[in-house]
Image: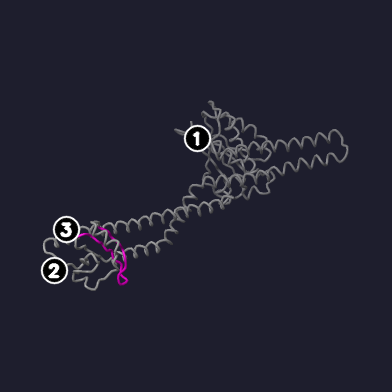
């Protein structure tokens, strides 16, 4: 769902960026055309005013024959006949514009662009006196070469502009939609996993009820089936509570009901709760390194986190194994370290261990395997308190993690 949107936005942004680039280049080209034309007109008027007319007023017609190389000058009478030409204009006969000729005799200076012998020129008609008007022309060949070169450069850079626009657009879209992409990915995964996880207990509950209704049963049998059903309902409720926390974890920290809590007391109570299970599995517990530590936290959530981690340790410690729990503190944090023996851990499992719904190789097919939410939710709770849970350097069949909570 998100990838087609990214591609569509990338195409739109690319076209917009490319269109904007082309617009800027086009404006630059027209500005070049306008500025060069205006500068040529200004220079021509300056030459006509300060050199041509000044020379004419001082010397008359004859000196013009041997003057000027850059500009072509001609003096015309009222019939449009060339009376005098500069040396470089003897064979220069542009098409006479009688309209501009008449306007020049009426005292107006006019300019036109035209081709003479396939070469572009800018031709100016200007008044001299009642008998004559002047016609000056300057070649635009070099200017047109520069414009053509600039236009070719624009055309050559278009593929580059397109590529740059595409790369920038793709980067900006990916960067802008990173959080949105994460949200959609999380939502899709969340929906898929919720369906998967709820299907098993609901199918079990439905199957038990269907079997029960097939025939009349004794009271004790009904009680047993209702107890099984109640157990499945508890599983569903527990799962929904975890899913509720999971859904919130992507957007905000938990709302906490904080109070001063003696963590050592919480740990002691939980260890006593797990004593029968530890004895049944013949697990050796070392809990001698526990100091008194108090912090400001949500007791119910922290209790749930520690219980969840102890439960995981007990669950994955093989019969006859060992387990230790240490509670200490430094200048800023309370540190709870839980270590247990287990089957050899895969490095890939360790890198994904805090991902929701992820089950390592050791938990797959495990009779007490969870839903892959425990560690993720535990870390979410601890981080909402300003702390963190980190995996310690593990090796072989030893697994160890540490909870840090701000004092």
Chain-order first, disc 1 or disc 3: 3
Label 3, on which residue?
A: 50
Label 2, on which residue?
A: 62
Considering the numbered disc 1 on the image, is that residue within a helix, a strand or a loop? loop
Disc number lying in front (3 or 2): 2
Considering the numbered disc 2 on the image, is that residue within a helix, a strand or a loop? helix
Question: Depth check: 303 or 81 in front?
Answer: 81
Whether residue 319 is visible here, answered yes or no, is no
Q: Name which residue lies at 47% across and 55% down.
A: 15
- Is residue 117 left or right of 21 when viewed as pictured? left
Q: Which mark is residue 240?
A: none
Q: Residue furthest top?
A: 260
- Is residue 378 left or right of 135 when viewed as pictured? right
Label 1, on which residue?
A: 386
Q: Which residues are magenta?
A: 109-129
Tell me if residue 188 is in the magenta stretch. Answer: no
Q: Residue furthest right?
A: 216
Where residue 318 appears, as percent x and y from the top left, is: 65, 45
Where residue 332 appears, as percent x and y from the top left, is: 45, 33
From the image, give the main secondary structure of the stretch colored magenta: strand
């Amino acid at each position: 769902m998100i990838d087609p949107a990214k591609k569509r936005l990338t195409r739109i942004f690319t076209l917009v960026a490319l269109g904007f680039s082309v617009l800027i280049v086009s404006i630059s080209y027209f500005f070049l055309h306008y500025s060069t034309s205006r500068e040529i007109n200004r220079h021509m008027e300056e030459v006509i005013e300060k050199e041509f007319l000044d020379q004419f007023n001082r010397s008359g017609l004859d000196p013009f024959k041997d003057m000027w190389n850059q500009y072509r000058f001609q003096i015309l009478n009222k019939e449009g006949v060339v009376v005098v030409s500069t040396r470089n204009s003897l064979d220069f006969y542009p098409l006479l514009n009688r309209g501009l000729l008449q306007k020049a005799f009426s005292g107006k200076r006019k300019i036109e662009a035209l081709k003479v012998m396939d070469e572009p020129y800018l031709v100016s008609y200007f008044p001299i006196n009642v008998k004559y008007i002047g016609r000056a022309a300057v070649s635009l060949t070099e200017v047109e070469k520069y414009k053509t070169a600039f236009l070719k450069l624009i055309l050559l850079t278009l593929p580059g502009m397109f590529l740059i626009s595409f790369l920038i657009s793709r980067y900006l879209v990916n960067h802008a939609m990173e959080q949105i992409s994460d949200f959609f990915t999380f939502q899709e995964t969340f929906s898929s996993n919720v369906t998967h996880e709820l299907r098993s207990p609901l199918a079990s509950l439905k199957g038990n009820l269907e079997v029960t209704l097939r025939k009349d049963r004794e009271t004790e049998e009904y009680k047993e089936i209702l107890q099984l059903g109640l157990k499945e309902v508890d599983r569903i409720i527990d799962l929904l509570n975890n899913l509720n926390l999971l859904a919130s974890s992507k957007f905000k920290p938990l709302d906490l009901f904080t109070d001063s809590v003696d963590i050592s007391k919480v740990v002691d109570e939980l260890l006593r709760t797990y004593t029968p299970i530890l004895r049944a599995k013949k697990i050796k517990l070392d809990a001698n390194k526990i100091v008194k530590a108090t912090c400001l936290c949500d007791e119910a959530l922290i209790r749930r986190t520690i219980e969840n981690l102890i439960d995981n340790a007990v669950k994955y410690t093989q019969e006859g194994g060992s387990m230790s729990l240490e509670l200490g503190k430094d200048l800023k944090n309370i540190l709870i370290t839980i270590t247990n023996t287990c089957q050899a851990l895969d490095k890939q499992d360790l890198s994904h261990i805090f991902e929701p719904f992820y089950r390592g190789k050791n938990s797959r097919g495990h009779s007490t395997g969870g839903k892959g939410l425990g560690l993720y939710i535990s870390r979410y709770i601890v981080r909402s308190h300003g702390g963190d849970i980190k995996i310690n350097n593990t090796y072989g069949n030893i697994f160890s993690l540490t909870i840090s909570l701000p004092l």
